[in-house]
Image (tube, coloured by chain):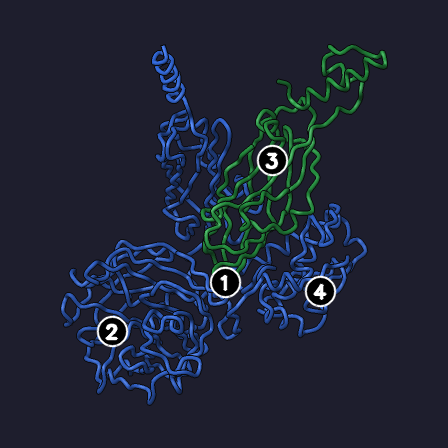
Chain colours: A green, B blue
Amino acid sequence: MKSPSQVRWMRAACVLVAMGASSCDTSEDDLRRALGDPILDAFEIRLRGQDAVRYEKLLLGMGQVDVTFFGEPVRFDPSPDARAMDLAATDHAHLLGRFFIPSYMKHVDITVRLDDVGAFMEDGATGLINAQAGTIQFTATRNALEQRSRVVIHLHLKDSLFEGRGGKTLLPATYIAY
Amino acid sequence: MMERKWLALLFIGAVWASQARANDFRAGQFVNGLKQYTVDAYPATLRFTLTATNIDPRLPSELHAAVDPLLQSCTLSPPPPLVVPPGEQVRYQCELQVRSYGDCLSMGEKDSNPATPNNEVTFTSTFSITWASGASHAGTNVLCLPQPSLFCDDTVYLSRTAASPDGRPTAPSRLYIFDPATGALTPQGEASLAYDALAFNHFDNTLYAIAADGVSPPSFIRVGSDGAASIIAPLDSAAPRTALWTAGAFLRDGTYVAFEHGSQRLIRVDPTTGQTLSEQQVSTSFDLRMTDFAVSPRDGRLYAFNNATQRLTTIDPHTGVATDAAAPSRIDGKASVNPIMGAAVFTRDGELFLHGAQGPDDNRTNGFHAVDVDTGDLTTLIKRPAPPFGDGAMCAFYLWGAPRPQPATRDRGFFGASESALLECLAHGPVSLGALGEVSTLSSALGVLWANPVIASNHERRTPVESLKVRTAREALTAVCNERFFGTPAPNLSALEEPAALDLERMEALRQRLERHNHSGRRTAIPLRKRIFAVDPLRAMERAEEPRF
């Protein structure tokens, strides 16, 4: 079983064979040198609410997403859907965006910061969410990412929102699934 | 032959099952039993409880790693990798000594939360666990204050005590801060004693109460900002030792006064020593049942809701003479059925508020009410189901020269959710944001306050420059509204007027300064005279108009 990135490199290599420039068994490093910029694999980052309990609506927006490899930033394209995500709709995993990595990156560090203020409706009453501490950080391995080309952050709403001054405070309790 | 095949399959199944692993863990974390804990005295001990729960009801799960970068001084024992049986959890305890306020700040510099330290959260601790196919995280916030955190403002303190099966009060008693703008109840902590008759002493900005459970002799106690109780002295009273003291308040002269329900006794106590200064029977010609009273800063009398007659009652704290209002209190202009009010507080402006407890007319009783002290009639300000509270407390007198709380501020969420606050801000005229434009209407102000920094409302991605403009404009508008609404001076915004304002570094520095300022006074209560008793962020979001920079 080959990983998606390997499949793409093999295809690229075969194209080069057809052009007489190389052979199909050329190593990836040789190909990278031959091709210049490597072909990148795209992976999605999604956010999904869970255990919504009495929340009829729970809106949070994306603040900033950083994907890095040993501290070096990796290209990340935010999704328009991440502007205001209703996490009370627990049947939907909202797309935060996609990041792109070459095959030699075997893991990435992902930091998701939500916008600092959100809103909720619970039992018909609305209120504010203080999401300043809503930073979610984890490391994703390529092996795990390649299972479905995505990582889904499950935010357990029941365990993540607590009464604070002026509204609810978000302290993310998460489960990372691939 | 067939039997052998089945046996072989069963054997393979048994071997497979013995090695099967579930893949469902959940991380959990608490600090001193809470998700958010406040430290205001040093040294302090923080007890972190970290859990990894196998939430699969049938299969064991193998925990690969467990780490909390901020608690590296602690050894997690037993260390992963380890197998957790189905439905069970592995629990780690970690004690952290915080020697000083500076210690706390340095932890905020080291933690994983880029927003800390700030005025609301000094540091965030994040516990992470991993297993074969996933990871889970859980966090706690710690707020460290340089000094004891209670100030004389309009903060509403509410206490609640558990009840034993025979109806007696029993530990723990829990302390909350109630936010009348949102109805939010923030737990502050709990005491291992059952107490009632909570009151705020304006001389030392400390809460006091009487611990009584109907069995042990009552004690006069101090209640810390973390909800913990410390006994000052046994209460010296002629009331029976099984007496339950239900109402408490501080008089202008700094003496504590409390009421005992069964014997109808009124007692005055020196809060420094806990010694009884005087004691008398309350004189009435009617039934008197009250769960709390508050002292008026205007006439010095004690005001209570008489649950027996459904009238407002006043008591002269020096003579013990009680006077019922002429007529039963009406709620929102209508007669009510046996309402029970649990907590009473007076502001320094002389306004009385009651928090309803429970009763046959729960729907109208439960909530926060303003009281017309002349007629005894109630106006519901915020209606939200809440557990019945034993008592309420608030600072009723301002002492000249006493330490003042940080000038009040609120973040953009408050102005983006409170239409009346934002309208009051805009009533002073358009808000100039210099190079970032001008805000003059409600919808344009909401548009700035609710603008997402990454994606515009037309779904276009913002560039880094546009994103910074959004973040800066939000904070600048909030700072101006804090000045106009609370009277808290905004930082100098003239930098936005200069052509160099759009220099990214300078703009980011300004944004950070504004953000710190807008969060600096969030712990100070909104004065109740401001009449902010509702916020509706969802409605405001719908009215927001995308800004143009």
Location of mark 2 (residue): B259
Name the disc covering residue A110, or none. Answer: 3
Q: Is residue B493 left or right of residue B213?
A: right
Say which residue appears at 43% left-offset and 64% top-offset: B178
Let me know if residue B171 appears in the view.
yes
What secondary structure is marked by label 1?
Answer: loop
What secondary structure is marked by label 2?
Answer: strand
Marks 4/3: CA distance?
A: 34 Å
Marks 2/1: CA distance?
A: 38 Å
Q: Is residue B243 left or right of residue B329?
A: left
For marks 4 and 2, the one nearer the N-term is: 2
Marks 4/2: CA distance?
A: 53 Å
Name the residue at the front extreme.
B2
Label 4: how many Cα within 10 Å (few below 14, some 14–19, many 20+) = some
For marks 3 and 1, the one nearer the N-term is: 3
The quarter of the picture where the C terminus of chain B appears is bottom right
What amino acid is at disc 3? Ile
Marks 4/1: CA distance?
A: 27 Å
The quarter of the picture where the N terminus of chain B appears is top left
Name the disc covering residue A124, or none. Answer: 1
**Quarter residue B497 falls in:** bottom right
